[in-house]
């Protein structure tokens, strides 16, 4: 073999090696990209599973609370005790009961049933206010489905028809009515409601009194706090695309995935910034006068000021 042939053979061998090495390198990068994509997808599935688990735990705790506030498990006992409870509240409020009628709901809900009564009574408006105040302070799972007021021959009295129902939740261990007070009312005493309601004519169109604003008083209504989606926007990973590194940010509240390069803007909820640099396990975002370093798996609000920012 001549020197020239040797040189040509070496050149061909080198080209083959370069070609083979290039193919191997391409396959390696493709495999890495696939693994990163799979990891990001797995992290998203994990996040959704954790969210579903949290919702399940909240629902379980809610069901436990409802069972504690339920009517007794035995339906006949529940009907008897709920009627006694209503009669006691009507009498304590100063109302005279004329008639009790048991009301059966035609369709039952899944996981619960209801016990309801229609009560016909009469009495002054203040007594009705006292009744409603005590009704809504109870921890029972109950609601008024109908309340009808009619004028009586005695101007100081009202004819009252009140329809109410309470829940009997499946799985409850209650043998008697739940006790306790639910502080749902804005005012702690019934008299405070009776004063404002008693001054009105219930059978005439209500016209609120005009309040004359004082020029010296500055009235401002505070704006409600805005929900910040940035607390639920997580840096989930990076991929190699087009020779550049791309960062993925998963916004769990919307299900959106942001795919960002260096220099791209980041606008999520109340967070605004620009991507400064992307690493395999961190992303640096300039927000305002700060450069924040967000680690893999953290949300945008978990970002820490970089050494450059701290040094000024």
Image (tube, rainbow, N blue to C red):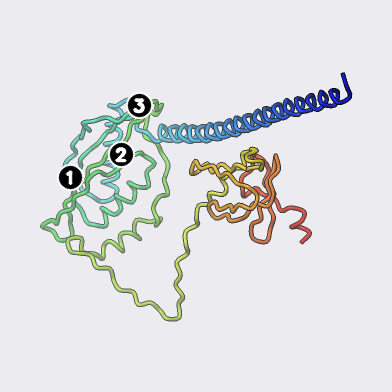
Give the spatial CA distance, label 3 vs label 1: 27 Å
Mark 1 vs mark 2: which is more N-terminal? Answer: 2
Relative depth, front residue between 30 and 14:
14
Q: Indicate which disc residue 205 carries.
A: none
Relative depth, front residue between 89 and 68:
68
User: Residue 191 appears at what percent x and percent y?
Assistant: 34, 59
Mark 1, secondary structure of its residue: strand
Side (left or right) of 179 relative to 12 = left
As drawn, which residue projects farthest toward the top?
A: 1
- Of badges 3 and 1, nearer the viewer stands 3
User: Residue 59 appears at what percent x and percent y?
Assistant: 45, 34
Q: Which residue is mark 2?
A: 85
Relative depth, front residue between 16 and 291:
16
User: Residue 107 appears at what percent x and percent y?
Assistant: 23, 30
Classify mark 3: residues with Cα within 10 Å, few (<14), some (14-19) or many (20+). Answer: some
Mark 2, secondary structure of its residue: helix
* Image point (16%, 44%), residue name: 98
Mark 2 vs mark 3: which is more N-terminal? Answer: 3
Mark 3 vs mark 1: which is more N-terminal? Answer: 3
- Of badges 2 and 3, nearer the viewer stands 3
* Image point (64%, 57%), residue name: 287
User: Residue 205 appears at what percent x and percent y?
Assistant: 19, 64
Give the spatial CA distance, label 2 vs label 3: 16 Å
Side (left or right) of 218 relative to 201 = right
Which quadrant holds the C terminus? bottom right
Q: Which residue is mark 3?
A: 73
* Image point (28%, 33%), residue name: 114
Q: Which residue is mark 1?
A: 120
* Image point (63%, 54%), residue name: 274
């Amino acid at each position: 073999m001549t020197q020239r042939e040797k040189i040509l053979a070496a050149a061909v061998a080198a080209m083959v090696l370069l070609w083979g090495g290039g193919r191997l390198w391409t396959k390696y990068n493709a495999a890495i990209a696939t693994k990163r994509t799979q990891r990001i997808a797995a992290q998203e599935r994990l996040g959704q599973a954790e969210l579903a688990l949290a919702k399940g735990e909240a629902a379980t705790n809610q069901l436990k609370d409802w069972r504690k506030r339920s009517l007794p498990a035995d339906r006949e006992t529940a009907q008897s005790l709920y009627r006694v409870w209503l009669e006691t509240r009507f009498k304590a409020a100063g109302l005279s009961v004329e008639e009790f009628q048991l009301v059966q709901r035609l369709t039952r809900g899944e996981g619960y049933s209801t016990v309801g009564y229609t009560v016909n009574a009469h009495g002054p408006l203040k007594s009705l206010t006292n009744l409603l105040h005590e009704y809504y302070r109870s921890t029972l799972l109950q609601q008024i489905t109908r309340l009808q007021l009619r004028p009586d021959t005695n101007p100081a009295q009202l004819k009252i028809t009140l329809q109410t129902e309470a829940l009997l939740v499946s799985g409850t261990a209650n043998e008697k009515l739940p006790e306790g007070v639910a502080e749902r009312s804005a005012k702690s005493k019934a008299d405070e409601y009776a004063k404002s309601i008693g001054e009105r004519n219930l059978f005439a169109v209500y016209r609120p009194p005009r309040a004359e604003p004082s020029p010296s008083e500055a009235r401002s209504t505070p704006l409600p706090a805005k929900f910040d989606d940035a607390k639920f926007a997580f840096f989930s990973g990076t991929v190699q695309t087009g020779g550049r590194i791309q960062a993925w940010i998963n916004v769990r509240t919307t299900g959106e995935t942001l795919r960002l390069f260096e220099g791209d803007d980041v606008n999520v909820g109340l967070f605004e910034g620009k991507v400064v640099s992307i690493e395999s396990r961190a992303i640096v975002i300039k927000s305002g006068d700060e450069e924040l370093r967000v680690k893999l798996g953290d949300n945008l609000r978990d970002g820490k000021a970089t050494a450059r920012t701290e040094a000024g």
